[in-house]
Amino acid sequence: MNRFKAVIFDLDGTLLDSMWMWHAIDIEYLGKYGIAIPDDLQKSIEGKSFTETAVYFKERFRIPETVEQIKANWNEMSMDMYCNRVQLKSGAKEFIMKLHKNNKKLGIATSNSRQLTEAALKAKGLYDYFDAVVTGCDVKKGKPDPEIYLKAAEILGVKPSECLVFEDVPQGIIAGKNAGMTTCAVDDEYSRKFIDEKKTLADYFVTDYNNIKCKGSFLED
């Protein structure tokens, strides 16, 4: 870990075990319009920013609400879950505290909304550990575009080559690679069908944060 000055985390499916929640919200939200979730939905919206996802829903499913109304409804539907029901990935908090203790700069780069991101981090007692929190509300292009990771590195004051990225989905891993950063894929139930692709794309792979050892200049799993 010595060669990395900063560690940047995605949020959903990476730090938080929250992908199940979004699946449930998609079912409920589209159900209001009598629409069943298509099989390709998860892959189709993977990596998109909060706004890009709302635009996608509006156009594909012909939702009568405005993009801003869609986002507001999603925020309202998910706020309680993020604060009270969604759990951190195993070992995540301890790993973050260890990195903080060792003076690593920490960042969040998530496609989620700022409102939900900050609420979740504060509810889990992690918000104050992060030096940069960049959300889908702060960029023009979602993942796999590298914008969100480059913006996080800029705020952290480090070079992209000095950053280690943790991600749970292929599009996020590609975004980190496109930014010129080292990437570590994190196992997650909702992206497990892409596990071989994740392992191929990323520089490292971990099942959770308990089995990461910081020794010398390498990650050991």
Image (tube, rainbow, N blue to C red):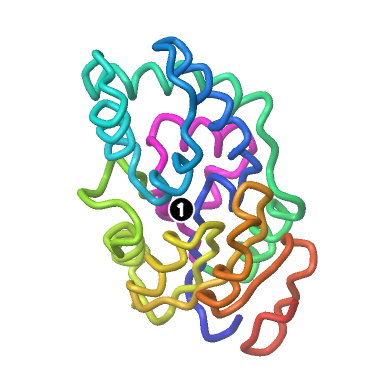
Check disc 1: other Cα within 10 Å, few if <14, some if 14-19, many if 20+. many
User: At 45% across and 49% down in the image, what residue appears?
Assistant: 43
Question: What segment is highlighted magenta in the picture?
Answer: 105-133
Q: Is residue 168 left or right of residue 144?
A: right
Q: Quadrant of the N terminus?
A: bottom right
Whether 186 is among the magenta residues is no
Give the residue displayed 40% in from the left and 74% down from the top.
177
Q: Is residue 23 above or below residue 204?
A: above
Residue 127 on the magenta segment: yes
- In the shown orientation, is residue 175 left or right of residue 40? left
Q: Position of residue 175 (x, y in %)?
A: 37, 65
Q: Is residue 50 above or below residue 199?
A: above
**Residue 189, position as x, y percentages in the image:** 68, 49
Tell me the amino acid under the disc marked 1: Ile
Task: Name the one closer to the observer, 128 or 140.
Answer: 140
Residue 26: x and y in percent read 49, 26
Q: Quadrant of the C terminus?
A: bottom right
- Quick check: 198 left or right of 212? left
- Residue receiving disc 1: 108
